[in-house]
Image (tube, rainbow, N blue to C red):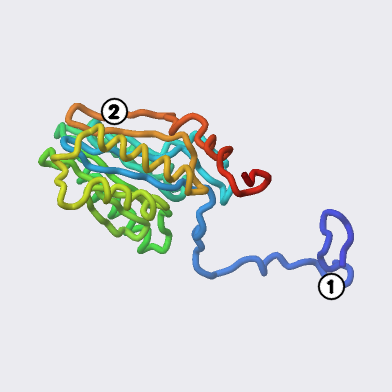
Amino acid sequence: MNHFPEVWGRPRDDVYGPYNHSYLQTTGPKAHTQSPAVTGTSVIAVKFNGGVAIAADNLASYGSLARFSDVKRLRAFGDSAVVGFSGDVSDMQYIDRLLESIDIRENYSTHGNMLNAKNLHTYLSKVFYKRRSEFNPLWNHILVAGFDGDKKPFLSSADLLGTTFSAPHLATGFGAHLAVPILRRRFPEERPTEEISKDEAVAALRDCLKVLWYRDARSIDKYSLAVITGDGIEMQEDQKIEEQSWAFAEGIKGYGAQVN
């Protein structure tokens, strides 16, 4: 083996001949990213009388490392739709640029109409399905909240396979296991959306985010919340769940040195 630093570990040229780099060339299939690197966790949303509330924390994790704590995963589109992203952050940025180009085209169009949330969800679900069909999926699970063409509250999801689902309250990531049961208990099926107030919906989202902060290792206590009503979008960014969230731990007895 060659022991010169720049070619350490390779066979010696004077013994085995020069290395043939043509072996590195391949005619195999084109490869795509199959494992997201930097990811965001749950997005939670719930319908209420006259609108939709949606929330997501600001953390982007590099594997299990809480790497970026200021990533906004809610994207407002026009004045009646918000897209919430979970999954790969680089793919989220790609979709964000896609939405920005659509936004510019819509604003400069001659027909004067803006895509509503239902139109936007249909478009994005087709984008996901196209990329999945090319074996190059966008590694995201999104929620689209806003209003449909009839000015009714709209909430639906789409995943990396292009699968869509609609419900009065939805969550992605770990929130599908922890937040949805809380929302179902607070807002059961027999309770119509018209009976749910804006304050109730926002309070439920805050409680869900608190549970995720305690239970989901990929969550953080800083979040963004958007409320979409007929008056427009109210976006609240860099909100804190509560001060000293883990202060109660000092009072827990029975572990470590505290036994009494």
Looking at the picture, does residue 238 appear above or below residue 156?
above
Residue beneath the point at 57% across and 41% down = 67
Q: CA distance from mark 1 to mark 2?
A: 69 Å
Question: 133 or 82: nearer the eye?
Answer: 82
Question: Which tag, 1 or 2, sits closer to the chain's start?
Answer: 1
Callout 2 environment at 10 Å: few (<14), some (14 to 19), or many (20+)?
some
Looking at the picture, does residue 218 appear above or below residue 70?
below
Q: In x, y percent, where is residue 191?
A: 16, 47
Residue receiving disc 1: 16
Looking at the picture, does residue 167 appear above or below residue 213?
below
Q: Secondary structure at mark 1?
A: helix
Residue receiving disc 2: 234
Q: Secondary structure at mark 2?
A: strand
Residue beneath the point at 51% across and 58% down = 35
Q: Residue furthest front?
A: 260
Give the side of residue 93 with respect to residue 142, left or right.
Answer: right
Question: 151 or 194: nearer the eye?
Answer: 194
Q: In x, y percent, where is residue 220?
A: 49, 39
